Amino acid sequence: MLVFSEQNLVLFSVPKTGSTAMEVALKPWADIAFYKHRKHTPVGRYQRKIAPFLKEAYDLAPDTMAVIRAPLEHLRSWYRYRADTLEVDFDEFVQAVISKTPPAWARIGTQHTFLTGPGGALGITHLFAYEAQTVLRTWLAARLGEEITF
């Protein structure tokens, strides 16, 4: 997660959506960067802990943004990420992910859960499709005042 004070913006790092490349490219503009185990902070935790801190400490109530992938591509990315340690094919991986009691290696969460707060309300002001990189980069360039390359 990156916080941009001047641009009044928070970038959420949704797992398996190219967030590491985005963070590397955007870090020069960020005032606050959460890394390691805080990098993938979901919206609910942000709303409970970080947003109140930003408001109290810096008088910020930033817009929020995130990138999501098409559901099947999101699953493919998780499968590729975990394939070295799995002895299942992609179809078996998908079945395990959507089962009522997934094994530990199939507990990947959902983009929807990551991006919603209490009560299931979407907590993102600006949501971009991973597959529409030109739209994302154009919007970021306008917001940051400079061309962005990932």
Image (cartoon, rainbow, N blue to C red):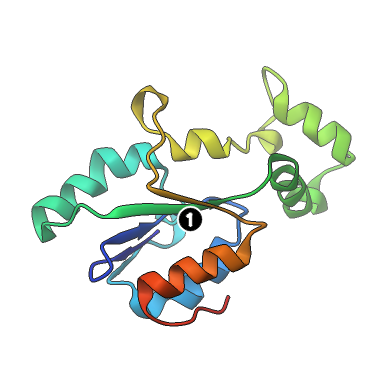
Q: Is residue 110 above or below residue 27?
A: above
Locate the N terminus and report the quarter of the image it occupies.
bottom left
Under mark 1, the amino acid is Ser
Q: How many marks?
A: 1
Q: Residues within 10 Å of mark 1 (few under 14, many from 20)?
A: many
Q: Which residue is mark 1?
A: 13
Locate the C terminus and report the quarter of the image it occupies.
bottom right
Residue furthest to the top: 100
Q: Residue at x 87, y 34 (%)?
A: 91
**For this view, does 86 lie left or right of residue 128?**
right
Q: Quadrant of residue 3?
A: bottom left
Name the foreground residue: 7 vs 94: 7
Question: Where residue 47 sits: x, y (%)?
Answer: 28, 40
Question: Where residue 119 sits: x, y (%)?
Answer: 37, 22
Q: Tag 1's secondary structure?
A: loop
Q: Residue at x 73, y 54 (%)?
A: 81
Q: Residue at x 24, y 43 (%)?
A: 49
Q: Quadrant of residue 7?
A: bottom left
**For this view, does 135 lie left or right of residue 6?**
right
Question: Where residue 104 sits: x, y (%)?
Answer: 66, 33
**For this view, does 19 lie left or right of residue 130?**
left
Q: Is residue 55 above or below residue 96?
A: below
Question: Where residue 14 sits: x, y (%)?
Answer: 52, 50
Q: Residue at x 26, y 55 (%)?
A: 62
Q: Quadrant of residue 120?
A: top left
